[in-house]
Image: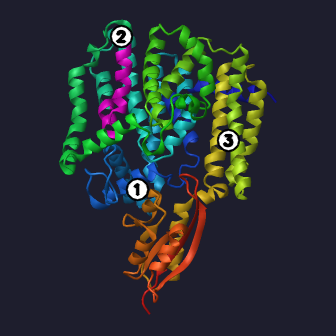
C-alpha cells in the first residue's frame, strides 16, 4: 500500500483543521504534546544541568529565599532568576494539589519547559503568518515541533524552551514591524515585543534581545535605514522591559554584594567567548554538522530550501529570515564553547524559510542530490532504531512495551518513505516525516531511555531506591539521613536524596557517617579502600548493597557501595 493512501487523508484533515486560527492552534498544541510527552514523566533527572536547575528551585522552596540562587552552599549566579520562579510556582501548585513528593518529582519542574516549547510552536505559527498562508504557516510550526532539539528541551527542566518562546514573541512582532511598518499602529505589538525582551532577560540574560538586535542591525545596514523603528516605540518599550528586570537585579546585586554580575557576565558569558567552558569546546562548523541530527526531520528540507534562499535573498521576507539566522549562527560558530541548544533560536526561522520554499514550489526536488536529501527523512529514524536495538543487545535488556508497540509502524513508515518520497507532493512528505518523528520519539524516549536498555545509566535513581531499601532493613531508625557520597558527585543524587547530601572523599565520608547513627553513605569503589581504612575497629557501619552501572556523564563504569551506620546496641 502506498504511503499516499495514509498521508492524503491526513492532508485533507489538515485543510479542515485550518478553517480557523483557533482550530489550527488547538491542533498544533495537541500535536506538539504528542511529540513532546513520550518519556516526559519517566525520564530520570538528566545530569548535569537539569538537576542543578531543579535543585536550586527546590532550595528556594525550602528556604523561602526567592532572590538568591544556590545549589547546596554554592551560589549559582550563571543565569537570572526567571526560570526558578516559574518552576517554583508550578511545584508549589503541585504541592498544594496534593501530588506526593512533588519537590523530588522531576517532571513537575519540566512542566515549565513543556509549556515553553508548546508556546514556541504556537508563536512560530503566529510569526509565520506574517510571511505565509495559514496552511504553510501551520507546516512551519509543525516542522519545528518535530525537531529532535526542541523535543529534548521540552523534556528538560532548564531555560531553553522558555527562552525560545520569548524569542518567537519578539521576532513575530519584529517581522510585522519590518514587513508592514505603516500598518503597525498602536501599542499592541510594541507591548508584545518589549515584554518578550524583558521576560527573556529575566530567564537567560542577553539571548532574547540578541536575536532581534542582530537581525535589526543587519536589515538597517541592508536597507540603509530603519523606517520600521518608530513603530516599535523604542524608548517607552525599553523602559518597560527594564522595569521587568531591574527590581530583582538590584536585590540580587545587594544580596551577593555585586558577585552576581561578576559571575554571570565575567565568568560565565565572557568565559564561553574566550574558551571552551566545562569541556564543551569545539571548532567552527560544529553546529553545521550537528544540525543534521538535532534538526531532524527538518534538516534535509533546509538543504533543499537553501538554493531558493540564496536566489531570493534580496526579497524582504527572505532577507528578514536570513538576517535572523546568519549573524546569530556565525557568532556561535565562532565562540569556542558549544552546546547544541545554543543555536535553537534560529530553528523557527529555518522552518519558516522551508515553508516559503514549499509555498512557492521552489524546493530543489528534481535534482539527484535533492532526492538523496529527502531520503535522510526516514534514514535517521532507522539510525535511531538501530542505536536503540544495539543498546538493547549490548546491555542484554529488552526495550519497553512502547518500543515493541511502535516498531512496526516506524519500520513501515520508514520503508514507504524511502520508496515513495519525492513522488508525492512535498507537504505529504513533510507530514510523513513528522509521523515518523513521533514513532521514533516513542521508541527512544518511552521504549529505550526509560526501560531496561538504559538501566545502567540510571545511577542516581537506583541509588536513591537502594537507600530506601536499606532504611527498611533498619526499622530501629526512624529514617536514614542521605549523609554523604564519596566519589559520585552528580547533581541528580542531591536532587533525589536531599539538599544536605555531602559530596566528599572516602576518608571524610567514613568520619562523617560515624558521627551519628542512622546515616547512609554512597561510596565509589575508587574511594572504598580509603573509606574502610578510616572506619574505627569497633564501627557499627556495615555494607548493605552495591549498585553498578555507567555514569551518564562521560560513560565511566561505576561500582558504588551503600553503607549505613546502625544504632548502638
Position in image of residue 91 (x %, y %): 38, 54
Q: Residue at x 75, y 19 (%)?
A: 423
Name the quarter where the C terminus is drawn: bottom left
Residue 32 in view in this figure: no
The residues tagged by marks 3 and 2 sit, at their Cα atoms, a distance apart of 44 Å
Residue 384 is labelled as 3
- Check if mark 3's residue and mark 2's residue have beta carbons within 8 Å: no
Question: Which label lies toward us, 2 or 1?
Answer: 2
Q: Residue at x 42, y 33 (%)?
A: 165
> Which of the 4 image quadrants contains residue 1?
top right
Characterize the magenta stretch by its predominant secondary structure: helix
The residues tagged by marks 3 and 1 sit, at their Cα atoms, a distance apart of 35 Å
Q: Residue at x 45, y 43 (%)?
A: 113
Bin the neighbour count of mark 1 within 10 Å (Cα to Cα): few under 14, some 14-19, many 20 and up: some
Colouring convention used in this rendered image of the protein: rainbow
Residue 90 in view in this figure: yes
Position in image of residue 270 (x %, y %): 34, 36
Q: Which residue is mark 1?
A: 94
Magenta region, residue range: 196-220
Q: Which residue is mark 2?
A: 221
Disc 2 element = helix
Image-based side of 8 in relation to 91, left or right: right
Amino acid at each position: 500500500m502506498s504511503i499516499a493512501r495514509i498521508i492524503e487523508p491526513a492532508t485533507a484533515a489538515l485543510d479542515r483543521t485550518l478553517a480557523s486560527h483557533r482550530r489550527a492552534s488547538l491542533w498544533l498544541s495537541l500535536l506538539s504534546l504528542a511529540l513532546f510527552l513520550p518519556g516526559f514523566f519517566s525520564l530520570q533527572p538528566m545530569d548535569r544541568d537539569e538537576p542543578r536547575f531543579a535543585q536550586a528551585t527546590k532550595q528556594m522552596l525550602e528556604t523561602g529565599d526567592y532572590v538568591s540562587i544556590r545549589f547546596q552552599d554554592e551560589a549559582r549566579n550563571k543565569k537570572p532568576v526567571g526560570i526558578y520562579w516559574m518552576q517554583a510556582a508550578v511545584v508549589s501548585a503541585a504541592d498544594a494539589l496534593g501530588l506526593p513528593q512533588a519537590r523530588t518529582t522531576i517532571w513537575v519542574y519540566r512542566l515549565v519547559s513543556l509549556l515553553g516549547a508548546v508556546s514556541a510552536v504556537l508563536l512560530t505559527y503566529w510569526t509565520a503568518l506574517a510571511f505565509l498562508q495559514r496552511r504553510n504557516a501551520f507546516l512551519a510550526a509543525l516542522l519545528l515541533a518535530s525537531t529532535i532539539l526542541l523535543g529534548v528541551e521540552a523534556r528538560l527542566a532548564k531555560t531553553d524552551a522558555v527562552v525560545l518562546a520569548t524569542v518567537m514573541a519578539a521576532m513575530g512582532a519584529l517581522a510585522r514591524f519590518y514587513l508592514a511598518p505603516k500598518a503597525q499602529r498602536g501599542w499592541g505589538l510594541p507591548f508584545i515585543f518589549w515584554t518578550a525582551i524583558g521576560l527573556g532577560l529575566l530567564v537567560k540574560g542577553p539571548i532574547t534581545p540578541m536575536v532581534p538586535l542582530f537581525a535589526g542591525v543587519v536589515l538597517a545596514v541592508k536597507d540603509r535605514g530603519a523606517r520600521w523603528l518608530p513603530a516599535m516605540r523604542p524608548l517607552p518599550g525599553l523602559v518597560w522591559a527594564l522595569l521587568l528586570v531591574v527590581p530583582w537585579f538590584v536585590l540580587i546585586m545587594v544580596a551577593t554584594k555585586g558577585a552576581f554580575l561578576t559571575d554571570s557576565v565575567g565568568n560565565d558569558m565572557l568565559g564561553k567567548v574566550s574558551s571552551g567552558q566545562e569541556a564543551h569546546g569545539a571548532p567552527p562548523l560544529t553546529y553545521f554538522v550537528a544540525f543534521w541530527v538535532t534538526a531532524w526531520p527538518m534538516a534535509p528540507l533546509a538543504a533543499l530550501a537553501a538554493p531558493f534562499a540564496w536566489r531570493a535573498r534580496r526579497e524582504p521576507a527572505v532577507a528578514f529570515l536570513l538576517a535572523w539566522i546568519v549573524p546569530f549562527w556565525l557568532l556561535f560558530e565562532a565562540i569556542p564553547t558549544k552546546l547544541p541548544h545554543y543555536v535553537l533560536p534560529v530553528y523557527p526561522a529555518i522552518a519558516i524559510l522551508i515553508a516559503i520554499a514549499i509555498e512557492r514550489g521552489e524546493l530543489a526536488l528534481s535534482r539527484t542530490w535533492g532526492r538523496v536529501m529527502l531520503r535522510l527523512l526516514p534514514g535517521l529514524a532507522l539510525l535511531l532504531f538501530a542505536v536503540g536495538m544495539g543498546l538493547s543487545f549490548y546491555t542484554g535488556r529488552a526495550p519497553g512495551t512502547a518500543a515493541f508497540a511502535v516498531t512496526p509502524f516506524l519500520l513501515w513508515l520508514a520503508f514507504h518513505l524511502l520508496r515513495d518520497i519525492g513522488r508525492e507532493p512535498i507537504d505529504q512528505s513533510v507530514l510523513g516525516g513528522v509521523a515518523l518523528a513521533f514513532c521514533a520519539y516513542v521508541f527512544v524516549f518511552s521504549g529505550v531511555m526509560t526501560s531496561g536498555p538504559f538501566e545502567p545509566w540510571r545511577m542516581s535513581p537506583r541509588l536513591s531506591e537502594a537507600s530506601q531499601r536499606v532504611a527498611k532493613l533498619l526499622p530501629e531508625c526512624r529514617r536514614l539521613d542521605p549523609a554523604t557520597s564519596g566519589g559520585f558527585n552528580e547533581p541528580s543524587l542531591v536532587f533525589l536524596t536531599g539538599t544536605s547530601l555531602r559530596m566528599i572523599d572516602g576518608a571524610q565520608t567514613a568520619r562523617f557517617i560515624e558521627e551519628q547513627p542512622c546515616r547512609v553513605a554512597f561510596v565509589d569503589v575508587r574511594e572504598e579502600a580509603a573509606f574502610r581504612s578510616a572506619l574505627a575497629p569497633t564501627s557499627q557501619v556495615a555494607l548493605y548493597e552495591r549498585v553498578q552501572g555507567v555514569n551518564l556523564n562521560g560513560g565511566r563504569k561505576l561500582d558504588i557501595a551503600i553503607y549505613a551506620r546502625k544504632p548502638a546496641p
